[in-house]
Amino acid sequence: MNAATPVRTVCPYCAVGCHLDLLVENGRVAGLEYAVDSPVNGGRLCAKGHAALEMLNHPDRLQHPLQRSATGWKPVSWDRALDTAAERIGKILAAHGPDALAFLSTAKGSNEENYLVQKLARVLGTHNVDHCARLCHASTLTGLAPMLGMGAATNPLSDLGRSDCLFFVGSNLAENHPVAFRWVQEAKDRGARILVADPRRTPTAWIADLHLPLKPGTDLALLAAMLHVIFQEGLCDDAFIAQRTRGVEALRASVKDTDPFWAARLTGVPARDIARAARLYAKAPRASLIYCMGVTQHVLGTETVRACADLALVTGNVGREGSGLFPVRGQDNVQGACDMGALSGLLPGYRPVSDPNARIFFERAWGLPAGTLGAVPGLTVTEMEQVAGDRVRGLIAIGENPVVTSPDSGKTQENLKRLDFLLVVDLFITETAELAHLVLPAAAWAEKSGSRTNTDRRVQWSPKAVHPPGEARPDWKILTDLAHRLGLGSFFPYTCPEDVLEEIRRVVPAYGGMSPRRLATAAEGIAWPCPEENHPGTPVLHEHRFATEDGLARLYPVVFREVPELPDADFPYCLTTGRVTLHYNSGAMTRRSPSLASRSPYLFVEIHPEDAAREGIRHGERVRVVTRRGTMEARAHVTGSIGPGVVFAPFHFPETNALTQNVLDPSAKIPEFKTAACRLEKMEGTGP
């Protein structure tokens, strides 16, 4: 028997980008070794990383193209599948034009695959291409880019270990990114102060010096009050503000009246704790601000992200080691998918579709006739779903599961059923694939090669370790073959992912120095921007100037508004949603993983003991949660980790987002996932 060969890959789950050393024996993955020499994770893995191999040979894996027939799914050949897809797409183009098509790209795909999705959409003549960043971190782009010139993490995750104060706002790093949390623990052991603003007492809050259990949707009020204290008590870095920012007077004026007592009435956090948090953060020699979807998944997401940046800028905590802004991404390649232009308003490298010079550049780079690329942004994920079956007649969904992940998902499901053509490319028959006319089997992360960009802009190459099962193919190959069937072969001449990366280097300056050869041998990966082959990469952004036209950061005024749906007599509680440690995104992979699903097998809701007593609900009983949009059944977890009046549910299960609001942040078009007025109903005859 041949000895097992180790192959170093990048974990397919969260955006920390941990290394997995797969042991390949006789063409199959026989196990994994801990990558103890990895600078990213040092051999550590979370529960999902440990269970990653369970998806590779799962019996539910799709192995052949499937076409819907009157009697159900029918296996078809790849030729038949691709011909059918091209024919159906061609009919929609002829009858309704290119904007009747829409494309959902995937944060679970490589940079090369995301680049090809958006290129195919745009070569066909539409900007209707988007992906799940619209549902998680779109407000990071709309918030940070106008202020700093870039909408990305300013520092590597390892810098958390060098911080003297770490302020978590809407981020449960300990549970959702546990490998990265080791740097927080190192900082804590070194004497750093830990501040956590979260409605729940999460595992991250367990080690906090100060937990601020604010009401969902009031983060902006908390940040405004902290800025008020910093200005009032002279805790600003005046030299940094004068030399490196613009707009301080408008910001100062906007928080003149937002004192901690004002914020206490809105947030439920004592005024003294708000003031103490402001002082601890502002007085620390090096402070880091870490935020996640507790900040971004709101109608005020853009404004709240900007308030986070304001806080970092007025205290001089940007552009240095051990400080900075950390928007922690959820999926393994959300950052890369954004970089590649898989967004309806942005071309690769974050060039707006409204910029005529950007459109001319890409038309020439891709060999398109002048005027092919339109000046108006396309539809976002939620907008596509709202007009599916009407303005949008065909949807190509690559690795996305909107029936589970989109707000008011019952309405999403109804609209997807009205499409003339729904093509899904995925590993499994997901809830969305159940509605498709054609499903194509995709290769998993270990079954294909490509680059991925983690949450701190670290680009890493993940090589193919084994062949995919049956006839499954990598996304890049499926997209290239489909383009050829559509008569676009001259625009898609690729024979391997490396060919695609070479094109990316030519059109995305931040990736210019990342050749396939260099990435394949870079043990630590390379942090963009890396414009040339001899450039070392840029772990810390904005050290000397910001990426704005004049090199100065922009401070934005803070204006607080209430969330769009408050509890009332009919719906007296606030439902908020989030992640749990054993599941991932829509649960399409983790709910099929035996070792994960056995430990977290069902949907639950966290209820405060006072609320449970009022409703006559005991721990472990079945309860019904009702909002104005839908109803779900779950098991009650009665716990003091959630505040009175608030109910928490994980979003990895199909039922949860049937209850959430499809009300959008006007700038980022991100939905209000984190607040929904609800009521609880005890289900009769359900004992513990």
Image: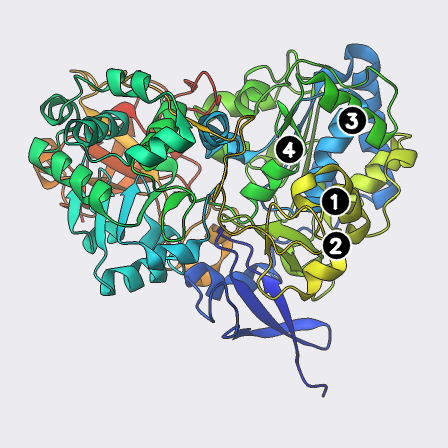
Of label 1 and label 2, which has the lower sequence position?
1
Of label 4 and label 3, which has the lower sequence position?
4
Question: Which residue corresponds to mark 4?
Answer: 342
Find residue 361 and name its label: 3
Work out which quarter of the rendered image holds the N terminus and state it. Answer: bottom right
Mark 4 or mark 2, whichever is nearer to me: 2
Viewer-closest of 678 and 535 = 535
Question: Which residue corresponds to mark 2?
Answer: 515
Q: Is residue 528 left or right of residue 172?
A: right
Residue 122 percent across, percent down from the top left: 75, 25
Q: Are marks 1 and 4 in contact (CB under 8 Å)?
A: no
Kindly report the distance in space between the C-alpha atoms of the residues bearing marks 1 and 4: 16 Å
- Mark 2 residue element: loop
Find residue 505 and name its label: 1
Of label 2 and label 3, which has the lower sequence position?
3
Q: What amino acid type is highlighted by mark number 2? A: Ser
Q: What amino acid type is highlighted by mark number 4? A: Ala
